C-alpha cells in the first residue's frame, strides 16, 4: 500500500497538469509537497530525538500504526480538494500524506534492519522493499485505470478555464469522481491495515536510550555521506518516474493510458531487482542456488507484469500489447542478473555497479536516438532496485544506540524526491523533456562515488573539543 500510494503521484501529475493547466515545473510541485514533508517530518523528529528518542518511548509498533492513520486522513483530504477544484488543497493533502509516510519510514526501516543480524540487514530490507515495489508496479495499471477510465465514467466533467470539458489523451472525459473514489478506498485500506497491526503480535525490540551527546550523530562520516546518497537516489528515481508518461508522450506520441503500462515496467524492474537482491545479498545460499532462484524469480515477475498489463489493456480498450513489444526489457534483465553475479553479495559493490549501469543508460538516452531508446529509461528501474536498501544499511552500520536517530536523518534526505523532480521539471520547460534527464545522471555519478568509497565506516573520535578562552 505504501508503494502503491507513492507511485500514484506519477499518475496524479499528468492528471493534475491537465485539469489545472500547469507547466512541468508547476506539476512537479506534487512531488515537492509529498517528499518535502519527509524532510519537515524527519527534521521535527530529529530535533525531539536530541532530547529523547520518540521510538524508545512509543515503540516501533505504535509508530507504524500512527503513520498508517495519518496516511488515511491524508487520503480523505483528496475528496474536498477535488470538490473545491483547488490545487493548493491537493498539495496540502499530499504534504499530510508525506508526513504519514515519514513516520512509516522512520519506524519500519530500522525495525526490519535490526530484526536479525547486521550482515543480512540489506537482504531483509530488499525483501521488504520488494513488496513495496509490488505496489509501485501495479499502481500505474490499477490506479491509472481507476482515474483515467473506470471511475471517470461517473460524475460531472471538469471544465477548463475556457469552460470546455477536459479530456484525457484517449478522449475520455475527466471527472472529479475519478480521483475522489480511489482515494476514499485507499483511506479505508490504511485504516484496516492499522487495525491489523494493532491486534498483531510483533517482536518487541528494546531501543537503547540515547545519550546526552545527541549531536554526536553528525560526526559519523559514512552516515552524512549516506544522507547525500539517499537524497540523490530518491531524487533520481522520483524524477524519472514522474517524467516517464510525459517523456513517452513527447518522444513516442503515446497517450497516458498506453504510457502508464510502460511506467509499470519501470517500477516492476525495481521489484525484480529487490527480490533478487534479497537472495543475492544473503550468504546462506550457494552461488548455484542463488543464480537458479534469481533467474526463476525474475522470469516469473516479468510474466506477472506482462499479464497485468495485458489484462488492463484488454479491459480498457479490448486490445493487449504483444509480448514482442517488451522483449528489449528481457535483455536488460539479463544484464541486471550479470551485475548481481559480479557484486558477489557485497552491498557496496552492487550499489557501485548499478550506479554505473544507470549512468550508461541515461547517457544513451541523452545522446542517441533509436527505435527502442525508451527502454533505456524504463530499464533504469531494474538498477534502482537495491539502492535504497543498500545505502540505508551501509549508512546506519555501527551506529548502535544512534540507529533510530541516524534513520531519521536518512529519511530527511528523501527531500531529494521533492527538489530534483522540481529541477528536472524546470529544465524540461526550458530545454525539453529528453535533455532534462541530465539531472538524474548527475545524481547517479554521486551514487557511484558512495558505492566505491563514501560508504566506508569512520567512527567519530571520542576526543572532546577544548575551547580556549
Image: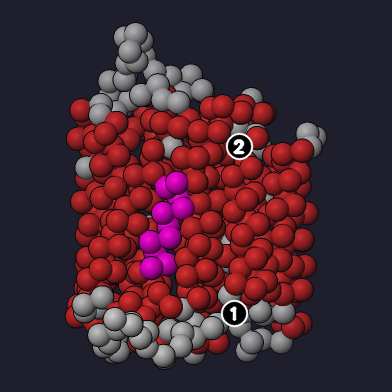
Foreground: disc 2 or disc 1: 1
> Is residue 212 or residue 299 the one in the foreground?
212
Quadrant where the image shows the C terminus: bottom left
Q: Can you say whether 189 is above or below 55 in the image?
A: above
Residue at the (68%, 67%) spot, across then down: 352
Q: CA distance from mark 2 to mark 1?
A: 32 Å
Give the percent coordinates (x, y) of residue 222. 52, 75
Which residue position is annotated with label 2? 436
**Is residue 233 toward the left or the right of residue 342 in the image?**
left
Q: Where on the picture, by quarter, is residue 369? A: top right
Write the start and end of the magenta stretch as one range.
409-419
> Is residue 184 or residue 113 the one in the foreground?
113
> Is residue 319 or residue 5 the one in the foreground?
5
Label 1 crowd bin: few (<14), some (14–19), many (20+), radius 10 Å: some
Q: Which of disc 1 and disc 2 is earlier in sequence?
A: 2
- Check disc 2 and report its element: helix, strand or loop: helix
- Check disc 1 and report its element: helix, strand or loop: loop
Residue at the (61%, 60%) spot, across then down: 446
**Is residue 207 toward the left or the right of residue 273 in the image?**
left
Which residue position is annotated with label 1? 456
- Total labels: the figure holds 2
Residue at the (29%, 31%) spot, across then down: 87
Quadrant where the image shows the N terminus: bottom left
Q: Can you say whether 370 is above or below 101 in the image?
A: above
Label 2 crowd bin: few (<14), some (14–19), many (20+), radius 10 Å: many
Q: Can you say whether 424 is above or below 131 in the image?
A: above
Badges 2 and 1: C-beta atoms under 8 Å apart?
no
Give the percent coordinates (x, y) of residue 207. 29, 86
**Is residue 35 toward the left or the right of residue 391 in the image?**
left
**What sort of colour scheme is used for the picture?**
secondary structure
Amino acid at each position: 500500500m505504501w508503494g502503491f500510494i507513492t507511485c500514484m503521484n506519477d499518475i496524479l501529475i499528468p492528471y493534475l497538469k491537465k485539469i489545472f493547466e500547469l507547466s512541468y515545473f508547476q506539476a512537479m510541485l506534487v512531488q515537492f509537497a509529498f517528499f518535502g514533508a519527509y524532510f519537515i517530518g524527519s527534521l521535527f523528529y530529529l530535533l525531539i530525538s536530541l532530547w529523547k528518542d520518540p521510538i524508545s518511548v512509543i515503540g516501533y509498533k505504535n509508530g507504524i500504526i500512527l503513520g498508517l492513520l495519518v496516511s488515511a486522513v491524508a487520503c480523505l483530504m483528496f475528496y474536498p480538494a477535488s470538490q473545491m477544484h483547488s490545487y493548493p488543497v491537493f498539495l496540502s493533502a499530499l504534504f499530510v500524506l508525506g508526513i504519514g509516510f515519514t513516520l512509516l519510514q522512520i519506524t519500519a526501516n530500522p525495525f526490519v534492519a535490526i530484526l536479525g543480524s547486521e550482515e543480512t540487514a540489506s537482504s531483509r530490507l530488499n525483501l521488504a522493499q520488494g513488496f513495496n515495489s509490488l505496489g509501485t508496479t501495479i499502481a500505474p495499471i490499477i490506479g491509472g485505470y481507476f482515474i483515467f477510465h473506470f471511475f471517470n465514467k461517473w460524475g460531472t466533467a471538469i471544465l477548463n478555464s475556457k469552460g470546455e470539458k477536459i479530456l484525457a489523451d484517449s478522449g475520455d472525459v475527466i471527472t472529479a469522481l475519478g480521483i475522489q473514489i480511489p482515494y476514499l478506498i485507499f483511506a479505508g485500506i490504511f485504516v484496516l491495515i492499522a487495525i491489523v497491526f494493532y491486534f498483531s503480535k510483533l517482536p518487541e525490540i528494546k531501543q537503547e536510550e540515547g545519550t546526552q551527546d545527541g549531536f554526536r550523530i553528525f560526526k559519523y562520516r559514512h552516515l552524512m555521506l549516506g544522507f547525500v546518497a539517499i537524497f540523490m537516489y530518491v531524487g533520481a528515481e522520483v524524477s524519472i518516474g514522474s517524467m516517464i508518461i510525459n517523456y513517452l508522450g513527447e518522444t513516442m506520441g503515446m497517450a497516458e493510458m498506453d504510457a502508464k503500462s510502460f511506467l509499470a515496467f519501470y517500477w516492476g524492474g525495481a521489484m525484480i531487482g529487490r527480490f533478487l537482491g534479497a537472495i543475492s545479498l544473503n550468504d546462506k545460499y550457494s552461488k548455484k542456488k542463488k543464480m537458479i532462484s534469481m533467474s526463476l524469480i525474475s522470469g516469473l515477475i516479468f510474466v506477472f507484469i506482462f499479464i497485468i498489463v495485458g489484462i488492463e489493456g484488454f479491459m480498457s480498450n479490448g486490445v493487449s500489447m504483444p509480448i514482442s513489444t517488451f522483449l528489449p526489457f528481457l535483455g536488460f534483465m539479463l544484464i541486471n542478473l550479470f551485475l548481481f553475479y559480479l557484486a558477489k553479495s557485497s552491498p557496496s559493490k552492487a550499489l557501485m555497479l548499478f550506479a554505473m549501469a544507470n549512468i550508461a543508460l541515461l547517457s544513451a538516452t541523452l545522446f542517441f536516438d533509436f527505435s527502442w531508446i525508451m527502454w533505456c529509461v524504463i530499464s533504469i528501474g531494474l538498477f534502482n532496485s537495491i539502492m535504497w536498501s543498500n545505502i540505508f544499511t551501509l549508512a546506519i552500520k555501527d551506529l548502535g544506540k544512534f540507529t533510530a536517530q541516524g534513520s531519521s536523518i536518512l529519511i530527511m534526505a528523501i527531500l531529494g524526491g521533492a527538489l530534483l523532480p522540481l529541477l528536472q521539471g524546470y529544465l524540461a520547460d526550458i530545454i525539453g523533456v529528453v535533455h532534462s534527464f541530465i539531472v538524474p545522471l548527475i545524481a547517479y555519478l554521486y551514487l557511484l562515488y558512495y558505492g566505491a568509497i563514501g560508504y566506508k565506516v569512520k567512527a567519530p573520535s571520542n576526543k572532546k573539543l577544548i575551547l580556549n578562552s
